[in-house]
Structure formats: C-alpha cells, structure tokens
Image (cartoon, helix red, strand yellow):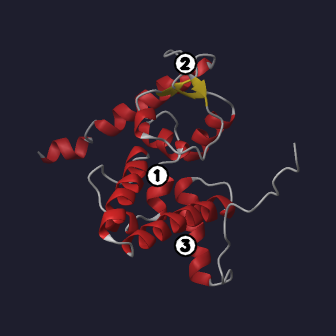
Amino acid sequence: MGDPKKKQKTYKTPKRPYVYETLMEELRTIGAYGLRNKRELWKAHTELSHMRGRARDLLSLDAEEKVERQQQIINKLAIRGLVMENGRLEDVLTLSVEDLLERRLQTYIFRRGLAGSLFQARQLITHGHIAINGRKVTSPSYQIKITDEETLDYAVSSPYHNPAHPLRRELEVEEAVEAEPSREARQLE
C-alpha cells in the first residue's frame, strides 16, 4: 500500500531558453525527426546527459572496478544499437542526440520504408498498425533494440499487413523509382 510516488519530470529544460541559435537548432531537429514538441527533444538531451555523466564517473574510478562497470554500460548501449560491442567509454562520450533519435521507432520505421514520411510513421504507430515481435507498440519514442529490428513489421490485425494494400504498393513504387537511375544519368554513360 502506501502513497504513490510523486511524478517527476523526465527532462530538463535549457538554462537559457530564448537564445536564437538554440531555438533554431531545436526547431531543425524537431523537423528532421518528426517530433511532436520540444519536450521529446529535451527528454533525449536529458537521457544523453545521464549516459555521459555515468561514463565520466567511470573514467575517474580505479582500474579493476572501471573495467567491470565499463563493460556493463557498453553492453547495455550495444543492445540498444548506440555503440559497438567492443566499444570504449570514449564512444559513449561522443554520442549525440541525433544518435538517440535515430533509434526511435518513429524514425526507424521511416528509414526502413514502412511509411512515406516521419509524420505518417508516427500516425501508424499511435494507431496500432506497427508490431514488434507480434506485440503492438503505440509509442513513437520506443527505443529500437538490435534484436527488435528483425521482428518489426505491420501488426497482424492491421489492414496494412496485407501486401496488396494501396499504401504498401505506393511505398514499393517509391522505392523502385529511387533505386532506378535517372534517364539523364543513363544517357551520360
């Protein structure tokens, strides 16, 4: 029983929120990754800050303890696809917010070609048309793991699961057009 835990913010806002360059950079990132609002971007910044902080703390430890804890962090991030399995703490310190945003389900679906745009990918996810390992995922910010990549597909209950669906045909045509070299390129050869 007992009282429920008080809700806490999962992000930190910028110290200087009205710096023009920061505002423009945030807007570029939001547009590039199809984020709904700045809160989603700030969550990624905060998560990255926590990862880097843990890595910096490990750098200050003695050798024996450092090796054991370093491998734990590297393994955890390798499962998420952020660093290589044989990575080092310096790789964790060089991570950027874009690396985290690339592992979002929304971005991954768009890059894989299951949706025509980032906004369409977000809509497919929130409406329950995407499944990982047979289970529907309705959170666009879900972080894709390496093991999830093979099992990602349209949900069985979704009309998009049918290969004859017009959306899937349209996406296949777009992929074929992008893969085919243009007429001018063929004439130049």
Which label was assigned to residue 89? none
- Label 1 near label 2: C-beta < 8 Å? no
Q: What element does badge 2 sit on?
A: helix
Of 168 and 9, nearer the camera is: 9
Around disc 2, counting alpha carbons within 10 Å, would you say few (fewer than 14), some (14 to 19), or many (20 or more)?
Answer: some
Q: Please state which of residues 180 and 138 is positioned toward the viewer in this rendering.
A: 138
Q: Position of residue 110 (x, y in %)?
A: 49, 41
Q: What residue type is labelled 2?
A: His
Count of numbered circles in the view: 3
Measure how far apart labels 1 and 3 are at the Cα level. Answer: 17 Å
Q: Which of marks 1 and 3 is nearer the N terminus?
A: 3
User: Depth check: 125 or 135 in front?
Assistant: 135
Q: Residue at x 18, y 41 (%)?
A: 186
**According to the image, label 2 marks what residue?**
161
Crowd tier of the residue under label 1, counting other residues whose Cα lies within 10 Å: few below 14, some 14–19, many 20 or above: some
Taking depth in this image into account, of 93 and 129 the one nearest to the observer is 93
CA distance separating discs 2 and 3: 37 Å
Q: Dividing the picture into quarters, in which one does residue 167 lie?
A: top right
Q: Which amino acid does label 1 sit on?
A: Glu
In the figure, 188 relative to 15: above or below? Answer: above
Res. 102 mark: 1
Q: Where is residue 189 in the image (x, y as percent from the top left)?
A: 11, 45
Q: Is residue 85 left or right of residue 129?
A: left
Residue 25 shows which numbered tag?
A: 3
Q: In this view, does 132 lie above or below 71?
A: above
Q: How crowded is mark 3: few (under 14 residues within 10 Å), some or many (20 or more)?
A: few
Q: In the image, which is nearer the foreground, mark 1 or mark 3?
A: 1
